[in-house]
């Protein structure tokens, strides 16, 4: 039988599972043998953030490496669950495949949708049917509590919109955003720290929705802004060092001059 596109990854998967088996064998690594799915959670979060950074960097090789690290942690967890008799890796994979098939009747069945809205409506309907008899009966019951706040706000707005609870137009969101801004400014003027924080949160929450409607994910947008600032700041430090200075030697006007040099260099 000729090799298929799935043969190579299947073989690599077996090899990585073999590595994990060796690590947690009686004569394996003392650290690995002490791990549980719970203790691996922080490592999974860390590796996931590194994967995201690798993807957003636009460097496929870094993404490849970090994807492998995430896969290692996931397979490690699956192996530990299997050894304790909870479930197997095959159980997880089969569950996911069956779920995706159910939720894509337009691909694996004869269902037809005229637009994305109809597709999402069916997705939510299928999820509700799947969650019958579980503790995930409400719209937000499946929302992970540990999501980064900006991403969580995006998901909250997205789910609300899919259920018809959102502003009818972008214009109305913009009006609401200005109202939230005014309320934040009023709280600042009153000098009440607690109110200021809450009103600022309301402003951000509404801003996330306006971005969502424009096809912008606030979490990713802010991450790009963070990385842009860090890159420019590092370049400022390099320019100062080339001139025998440090940033602490410079005043604000001089640093702004360096900042503008960096921006002009980026445009050239």
Image (tube, grey):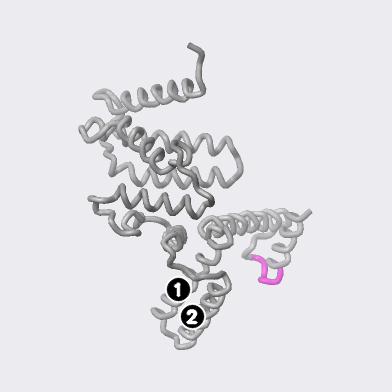
Local crowd size for mark 2, using a 10 Å CA cut-off: few (<14), some (14–19), many (≥20) = many
Q: How many marks?
A: 2
Return the residue at label 2.
184
Q: Are marks 1 and 2 in contact (CB under 8 Å)?
A: yes
How many angstroms separate mark 1 from mark 2 (CA)? 8 Å
Residue furthest top in the image:
1
As for residue 252 lying within the magenta part, the answer is yes
Relative height, residue 155 to residue 201 (above, below) = above
Q: Secondary structure at mark 1?
A: helix
Relative height, residue 12 to residue 241 (above, below) = above
Image location (x, y in percent) of residue 53: 53, 47
Image location (x, y in percent) of residue 122: 42, 50
Foreground disc of the pair 1, 2: 1
Return the residue at label 1.
202
Relative height, residue 158 to residue 206 (above, below) = above
Residue closer to the observer: 15 or 30: 15
Residue closer to the observer: 102 or 242: 102
Image location (x, y in percent) of residue 217: 53, 57
Which residue lies at the image location 52% right of the left edge and 83% below the top edge?
Answer: 182
Q: Which residues are magenta?
A: 249-254
């Amino acid at each position: 039988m000729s090799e298929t596109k799935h043969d190579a990854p299947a073989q690599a998967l077996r090899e990585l599972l073999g590595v994990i088996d060796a690590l947690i064998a009686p004569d394996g690594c003392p650290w690995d043998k002490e791990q549980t799915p719970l203790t691996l959670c922080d490592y999974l979060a860390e590796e996931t953030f590194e994967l995201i950074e690798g993807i957003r960097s636009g460097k496929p090789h870094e993404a490849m490496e970090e994807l492998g690290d995430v896969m290692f942690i996931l397979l490690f967890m699956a192996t530990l669950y299997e050894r304790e008799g909870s479930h197997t890796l095959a159980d997880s994979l089969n569950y996911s495949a069956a779920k995706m098939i159910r939720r894509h009747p337009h691909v694996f069945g004869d269902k037809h949708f005229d637009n994305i809205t109809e597709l999402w409506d069916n997705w939510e309907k299928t999820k509700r049917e799947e969650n019958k008899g579980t503790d995930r009966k409400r719209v937000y019951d499946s929302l992970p509590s540990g999501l980064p706040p900006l991403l969580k706000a995006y998901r909250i707005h997205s789910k609300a919109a899919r259920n018809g609870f959102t502003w009818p137009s972008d214009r109305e969101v913009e009006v609401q955003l200005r109202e939230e801004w005014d309320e934040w400014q009023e709280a600042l003027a009153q000098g009440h720290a607690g109110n200021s924080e809450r009103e600022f949160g309301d402003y951000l929450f509404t801003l996330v929705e306006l971005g969502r409607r424009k096809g912008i994910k606030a979490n990713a947008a802010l991450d790009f802004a963070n990385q842009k600032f860090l890159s420019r700041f590092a370049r400022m430090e390099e320019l100062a060092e080339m001139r025998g200075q440090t940033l602490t030697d410079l005043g604000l006007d001089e640093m702004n001059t360096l900042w503008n040099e960096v921006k002009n260099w980026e445009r050239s």
